[in-house]
Image (cartoon, rainbow, N blue to C red):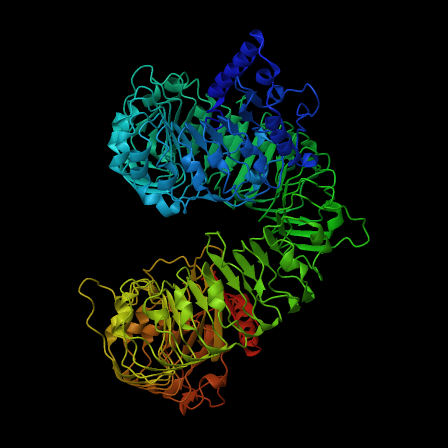
Amino acid sequence: MAHATHLLPLFILIQLYSLATFSHGHGHGNTAASSFCHPDQAAALLQLKQSFIFDYSTTILPSWQTGTGTDCCLWEGVGCDDGGHVSVLDLSARGLYSNGCHPAIFNLTSLRYLDLSMNDFGGTRIPAAGFERLSRLTHLNLSHSGFYGQIPVAIGKLTSLISLDLSTRHGVDISYTTTSYYTLLGGYDYLLLQEPSFEILVANLTNMRELYLDGVDITASAEEWCVVLGKAVPHLEVLSMVRCGLRGSIHSSMSSLRSLTVINLEGNDISGVVPEFFSDFLNLSVLQLKYNSFSGWFPLTIFQLKNIRVLDVSRNRQLTGHLPEFPNGSSFETLNLLSTNFSGMKMTSFSNILYLREIGFDARSIFVEPADLMFKKLNSLQHLQLSFAQFSGELRPFFLWISSLKNLTSLGLSYYFCELGPFLSYISSLKNLASLRLSYFSSFKIMPNMIGNLTNLSTLEITFGFTGQIPPSIGNLNKLTSLTISDCGFSGAIPSSIGNLTKLRSLDIRWSGLSAMLSLDLASNQLSGPIKEFGGLKDLVSLDLSSNNLTSLVHLSSLWKLRKLVHLVLSNNRLSVLDGEGSKPMVPLLPKLVILGLASCNMTRIPRLLMHVNHIKMLDLSSNNIHGTIPKWIWQRWDDSLTSLNLSHNIFTYMQLTSYVLPYNHLVSLDLSSNRLQGQIPMPNLLTTTNFYPQFLDYSNNRFSSVMSNFTAYLRRTGYLKLSRNDISGHIPHSVCDLSNLEVLDLSYNNFSGIIPSCLVKESNLCVLNLRENHLEGTLPYHVSKHCNLKTIDLHGNKIQGQLPRSLSNCAALEVLDIGNNHMVDTFPSWLGRLSDLRIIVLGSNLFYGSLTYPTRDRKSREYFPKLQIIDIASNNFSGNLDPQWFERFASMMAKFNDTGHILRHRTYYRDYHNTVAITYKGQYATFEEVFTTLTAIDFSNNALEGDIPESVGSLVSLHILNMSHNAFTGRIPPQIGEMRQLESLDLSWNRLSGNIPQELTNLTFLGTLNLCGNRLDGRIPQSRQFATFENTSYEGNAGLCGPPLSKPCGNSSNPNEAQVSISKDHVDIILFLFVGVGFGVGFTAGILLKWGKIGKWFRIV
């Protein structure tokens, strides 16, 4: 609210001044030329009016009329100077809609005050030229108006500016407008400052007093922002730069801005300490630093500033401090320390703050006094945020205190893992409570019906928690205007009682009779059943029902009446969406539609209504059954607006193209993967783009056979390029190294040949390099940059020769190294053990040789391969004995290593890149398309290793797969293997092992595959637990073994050491079903999901 109203007093003064000068002109009998506005001024305003589309606006500017005797100086929102020139134009928050800013506005060259905020200019570019003509401007406000792109350098030349507001998206109160909804949806792009830079923009604005750039991307100059402000705007009073991508520490040069009264730097990545010199800003009244990375001790002197009213440092988890004893009459109105490391606070600390209205803190950091000491305290408190994260104390004192806050209107509660009912009973007495936010609750808790007793609520938000059904008692909250239920585990049908909430304007579920609703968002729950018609929701702007279990037919024609709809997402349900053939179309259909998501909607063709939608920015038709041709119009209709197109996982076979250079100028994401497309790959035209976001391109899993010879020329902004699993041949061009923004390059499973461009490994900015299964040859570059960013190197299945470069140790972030199935000749790269993030090493099927003696570890590290989870050195020429220390340092395979498990991936701007690995699993060569960090495997098979298997292997109690087959190991099977309780697959076949099978191996209750063939084992085969399920193929080639499942009996002697262990038949049936199913799935190379017994994590195997 402070942001939205900051210009109100100034505007009132300007309007009074305008009226005064107008009256002065009439009172002195001025001529018509000086009393009335100039005709050219009226003409410019009328041109501007004609550019607005009033069918979609909330005003028609009725006073703006042509005709004799009309004076534009009397028109709505217009003020003039003594000479009849327009000096004030205020059209803020009028719900105007346009496809761009008409250049006629720049003919109003006498403008001093221009406010176009809170309107909708259609997500168009901010005009690059024209502002330089408004040289008299002192106040410019274009905030939240749907402009995007580079802020023009001309604004930086308006040297008279006192106030500049170019904010976008953030902090918008929905009540201010009824049609400018992109702020609610995030459908339009950002404004940004790169060329010109932030420094160039403000360098000449020395008169600036108020600067608002919330949401403007100024990342390019973020580290210097303090220095720039300190030099350029010495008299700055208000600084608001929310979510601007600022980083680094606050520089001392900011200390020169002694006139600052408001500092709002929320939502950046500013680090370091909060500077002590802030306490020198004697006029400082607002300091908002929440959602940053501040650390260290917060200066106590800031609390003692006489004028400070608002202090919010919440969500800085490393920020520490204590509260002082506030002086009598302290001016604080807002004090938010939520999710910080403040400690030792007491409720008595606030006793001298007479007008405290908002407070936020962690329950673990404050002491609540007995109830009789605090009932009379904080009577002015209206807003409370309270987190119970890491709290282990008594709850009742907090409940009593909260119930005493009779003026409380807003309450936020998070990380509360107890039953909610007792808490609701306490707060039910708060008759003024209008807003309740419950977040991060236990997902095992059921929302009690008692929630329906809070009948005065107007806002209810329930996020991240709860299960069961949405309680029908929510229908009792008939004063609700906003209801949000997101990221919960709710299931079942939507209760019909929701229909009682007739005042809702923002709702995450829809029911009949809610004609005033703006937003319907029920994404990512587990709701089921049909959905009803939406036609009655004439003001609906956002409809998102994605990722549920909703079922029914949806006719797109039923949505045509929603003329204000901007955001429509029905993806990932069990819906069947129909095109609405036969219905009478309205042209243009859905004139404001910007985002359309219809993924997994059982469609068989591209909806034809899209031919009548003019300004699509994001279109997702993925994972349907759409077949045939991608039509020509889809490449042409939105060439100046489309930023994201996803047609993946369909059955497209052909593209209608007039050129292999697509006409899109602003595309940042194109996904055509998993179709049947053929021929040459088309590339988006980004040679002249001004879009600064990294581009995502995925053409994988098709039948493309070629790319343009100069295709890299079109990829200068590409960050993610995936061409895998096609039929592309030829050489990898060296020009790919010129793509400085490229993070992910995946050319795997093609027919590329020739030498790998050395720069890809040597000096690029790549994080992922996947050239798997091609025909590449040559050697790897010897020198790798010390600034190597590579996390994944996958060169498996090529013809690469030579040695593994020792300089790969410069790739400190390396997680995956797979050079299997090549022609490399080298010794074991023990020097890789120093890479602390390395998780997967695959060297199999090469010509590596030598011993595997334990290397001398790095003096600075006590661990060797500390995160290694998969090592495959199979089918090489390694020989000699295994040093026992080999297995004593694999921390990731030991019980003490506490890894909860997550998919191994590389995060990019638009999509995560999932690493894959192919290993021998249960006797089959299987590809894990999704690798969890809890999957662990060792494969030393098909070498010439000899001697005893070290007993230390038993310390790897988290290992799942162990394959040491086809070597020359001798001695006994170590009984310590029985301690490896997570083992799923054990293969020791074709060695020279002797003696009995250790009875301890029956402790391996998750063992699904056992192969001990081709050894010299003897004695009785154990029978308990999993051993009762193995067939004779597990033991063939051991002449001395006897007993089931072999036909050879053991006579009457029994093994006294055989444990008599009773087992649950149900448990064995589950294990059998699980692993026989996996074996079946692998055998037919079909993708399945497998859930490990105790691991509880999923792996995809293909």
User: Which percent across, then down, holds residue 578?
Assistant: 74, 55
Q: In the image, is residue 507 above or below residue 528?
A: above
Task: Report the residue at 45% width, 89% height from top.
Answer: 1036
- Residue 70 as seen in the image, left or right of residue 713: right
Q: Is residue 150 visible?
A: yes
User: Which percent across, then down, holds residue 663?
Assistant: 58, 59
Q: Is residue 1059 visible?
A: no
User: Which percent across, then down, holds residue 1081?
Assistant: 56, 74
Residue 347 quadrant: top left
- Residue 631 as seen in the image, left or right of residue 773: right
Residue 289 quadrant: top left
- Residue 462 as seen in the image, left or right of residue 339: right
Q: Nearer the viewer, residue 98 or 345?
A: 98
Q: Nearer the viewer, residue 830 or 696?
A: 696
Residue 939 quadrant: bottom left
Q: In the image, is residue 55 above or below residue 712?
A: above
